[in-house]
Image (cartoon, rainbow, N blue to C red):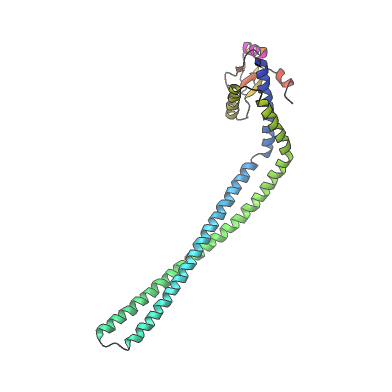
Amino acid sequence: MEQTVEQKLQALWDLQTVHTKIDKIRQVRGELPIEVADLEDEVAGLETRMEKIRSELDDLEDAIVNRKNMIKEAQAAIKKYESQLNEVKNNREYDAITKEIEIQGLEIQVCEKKIREHEFEIRNKTEIYEKTEGDLEERKKDLAVKQEELDTITSETQKDEDELLQKAEEAESNIEERLLIAYTRLRNNAKNGLAVVTIDRDSCSGCHNQIPPQRQLDIRQRKKIIVCEHCGRILVDEAFVENTFA
């Protein structure tokens, strides 16, 4: 059944009233949902960082073990070459074995240098790991506090919000799609979420700009949908407040 303009305006006002109540409930929660989400992201980031550092520390420990094994192999090779020196038959063989001993000695020096570098890295990364671990514990405590605050507020208001969301769905079902799309666009663009507003002291209660007398008369006659010339919000007369959708 085709709705009259007055019925369309009433449906829009009913929906706006319900949405305003929902907005007020969510305002009570304030920035808590955002703060909780940010802390969750921070905790996840710190945990990822710790995993990365732990993996790097494991790699450094493995590298040290490998270098120590290389030193042992080089030392064993030196002993073998030194025993061969007693059996050399000419200078050429002596020089060759001495060269091998020198090479193994250099290999030991390189490995020892690398071990010192790895140990230095381990100390630095361990400090970073421990600091990150401390930061993580602090962020987890902050998250627990904020989450508890949010849970408390949500538990106190969730039932009311769910009921209002149900009413919003019912109100939306009474509005034609074209008007609902326009309403949603206006509501999303408005900082205070108001898409439908009343006349208040001869002005738009959304942007507070003056409404000409003739335009006010047209609004009160409810024969067509009229929007504010300044902010684009849908205008209804003061009497709609008395008939607010409960």
* In the displayed structure image, the side of residue 140 where residue 60 appears, left or right: left
Question: In what quadrant of the picture does the C terminus appear?
Answer: top right
Q: Is residue 40 above or below residue 201?
A: below
Whole-percent x and y of residue 209? 61, 20
For the image, the number of numbered tags is: 0
**Quadrant position of residue 222:** top right
Locate the N terminus by quadrant. top right
Q: State the extent of the magenta-drawn residues as a range.
A: 213-220
**Res. 76 image quadrant:** bottom left
Q: Residue at x 67, y 47 (%)?
A: 147
Residue 144 versus residue 79: which sits nearer the camera?
A: 79
Task: Give the prevailing secondary structure in the magenta stretch.
Answer: helix
Whether residue 37 is in magenta: the answer is: no
> x and y percent of residue 30 in the render?
66, 39
Q: Is any atom of residue 236 visible in this view? A: no
Q: Position of residue 40 (x, y in %)?
A: 60, 48
The residue under the point 67% across, 22% down is 11
